[in-house]
Image (cartoon, rainbow, N blue to C red):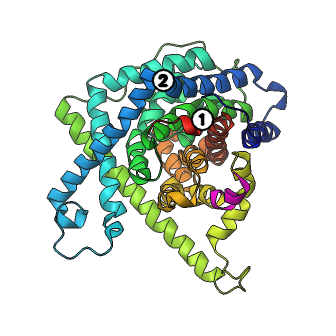
Amino acid sequence: MSGMISPLNLQSIAGMALILVLCWLFSENRRRFPFLLMLGAIGLQLALVLCLFGVPAIRAGLTSFGGLFEGLSKSAQTGMAFVFGYLSGAGPQPYPLTTPGALFVFGFRVLPVIMVVCTLAALLWHWNILKWIVKGFGFVFSRTMGLRGPTALAVAATIFMGQVEGPIVIRAYLNRLTRSELFLLITVGMACVSGSTMVAYVTILQGVLPGAAAHVLTASIITAPAGILLARILIPRDPIAEAAQDKLPPDERVYKSSMDAIMKGINDGMQIAVNVAGCLIVFVALVAIVDMLLGGLPQIGGAAISVERILGYVFSPVAWCLGIQSSEIHTAGQLLGTKMILTEFTAFIKLGAIPAAEMTERTRTIMTYALCGFANVASVGINLAGFSVLLPERRDEIIKMVGKAMLAGFFATCMSAALVGAIPAFITAMPN
């Protein structure tokens, strides 16, 4: 990964600095900026990237994830074909096929993958495989980021299980978290994604981004330290308020048998899939309504005013901070705005629909990291609903901080994207 530092690399470095400064300006205590945590978080991110893509054995393992994710996608397609036949897009079609791209139906190709992966995750948790992986990451975050044991465990679980599912692992301890720790947990949940959606994103990006599986997996892992850092800047740690108890709480996610894990995984997967589908339908419809209203205004530059165009201009400065070249800043800004307003699924669909020849690999890779997170308006509602069940006695406190957590999570993904953009020759060193 050697190479000369280019102006775009320096642009990404400047973007990271701007994100940190912006969060410091809105901090609840500017005098307590976590300098050591900043160095540790950025150092851990950089070490993870260099380790994941610089060590041949690990890099080969990441490359194999592409085949694993593709296998999961095909297995889900097999199940869909059994239930829905040719409507799923798999197998022989009863009519002449004139537009092959039309066979990629989001509801049949992506949502089933979520259910399959949720079921596998529950099974692997019951078999203690996923549990030990989560504990390993929790140990790393505890030692390098200064998190207490339960908080570190929940952060690690969130990377693989999702923004509401992860905290369930320490449900018995949630009410004893300080305000800063609770805000940190919500922020990391919005900054990362779940294992089920990782596979869905890879399915969308296959064919337009080399090494898509490796990028998506790496994006979710390295964004956790960024989320921790930005959360600590906005609401600094309060050592006095933290109880001196590091003993882990009992595991709340227990399955009675492998079949019980499978059935509960199916149920969880269906709920997530329905929630994703519902959010996409409603938010896309709302934007369409706004676009119809804007259509009555005079055209600008020979084109009608739309939500997508407005988002492109509003988020163009953010795209610049990621190290995007000037010719692609507006397109990148549209994707960032779409991610925040319409969910990251919609943004990934739009990114996957851009032909390879119309966007540079550097920009596409950086945007994959920037979009890989749950920080959007819909997630505000999801977190309010989920944590209201887990922590009903602290609902008012959560309402006051969830909007700020969304912004922190959004900037955490941007910080990871800028870090990738700051590494010379990183894009050309990717596994295919």
Report the amino acid beneath label 2. Leu
Looking at this rendering, what residue extends furthest in the front direction?
Answer: 3
> Magenta span has 331?
yes
Magenta stretch in the rendered image: 325-332
In the image: residue 96, left or right of residue 281: left
Measured as percent of width and height from the top left, residue 101 is found at 35, 67
Looking at this rendering, what residue extends furthest in the right direction?
Answer: 31
* Residue visible at 37% across and 39% down in the picture: 66
* Residue visible at 58% across and 35% down in the picture: 223
Residue in front for this viewpoint, 4 or 269? 4
Q: In which quadrant of the rendered image does the C terminus lie?
A: top left
Q: Secondary structure at mark 1?
A: loop
Query: Which image quadrant for residue 44?
Result: top right
Classify mark 1: residues with Cα within 10 Å, few (<14), some (14-19) or many (20+): some
Query: Which image quadrant for residue 131?
Result: top left
Q: Measured along the vertical axis of the image, is residue 280 above or below residue 290?
A: above
Residue in front for this viewpoint, 296 or 33? 296
Q: Secondary structure at mark 2?
A: helix
Measured as percent of width and height from the top left, residue 295 is found at 63, 83
Q: Which residue is mark 2?
A: 153
